[in-house]
Amino acid sequence: MKDTLVRQVVDASDRIPKFLLPVIRDRLSAGGNVSRAILVVAAWSRFIERTRSAHHGPVLVDKRSADLNAAVVAEASTPGAFLDYEPVFGDLNGNGTLREQFAAARRSWMSSAPAGRWSPL
């Protein structure tokens, strides 16, 4: 079954806290690896960032889109700032390990994804 990225990220600010963040919390509390899970969050932040700059690309469909856009803008000057958006990330924003892995995932994503290309997302 083929699905589009754009449909998958509709209201992701509701989906990520319900489905992905509990996994991240559990893995962190067990001292486990969260690199793959945090890559999802990093990719989502990049998607939001790209919708801001795309003239003919996808549109961010999320009830928190204005706040998410502001969080992505803050990320540009303060790596990890996207995680400060409390309505989505809650208390996870204070986890230094998570912030480091998130910032590393974004750097990796930004250096490896071809400019103007949506398919890797």
Image (tube, rainbow, N blue to C red):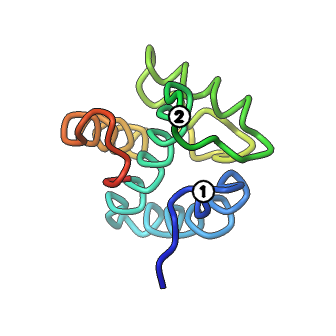
For label 1, the residue is 9
Q: Position of residue 73 (x, y in %)?
A: 55, 20
Question: Observer-nearest residue: 39 or 7?
Answer: 7
- Foreground disc of the pair 1, 2: 2
* Disc on res. 56: 2
Q: Nearer the viewer, residue 26 or 18?
A: 18
For label 1, the SS is loop
- The amino acid marked with disc number 1 is Val
Rendering coords of residue 36 (x, y %): 34, 62
Q: Residue furthest top?
A: 77
Viewer-proximal residue among 105 and 101: 105
Cα separation between marks 1 and 2? 17 Å
The residue shown at (50%, 30%) is 54
Q: Secondary structure at mark 2?
A: loop
Quadrant in which residue 69 is drawn? top right
- Residue 58, compared with residue 16, is above or below; it is above
Q: Position of residue 7 (x, y in %)?
A: 61, 62
Q: Residue at coordinates 58% horizontally, 63% vertically from top-left?
A: 8
Q: Mark 2 or mark 1, which is nearer the start of the sequence?
A: 1
Say what amino acid the circle numbered 2 marks.
His
Between 117 and 99, the one nearer to me in the picture: 117
Q: Could you tell me if the residues under marks 1 and 2 are in contact, i.e. CB atoms within 8 Å?
A: no
x, y percentage for residue 76?
44, 19
- The residue at the far front in this view is 56
Residue 76 higher or lower than 56, as above or below:
above
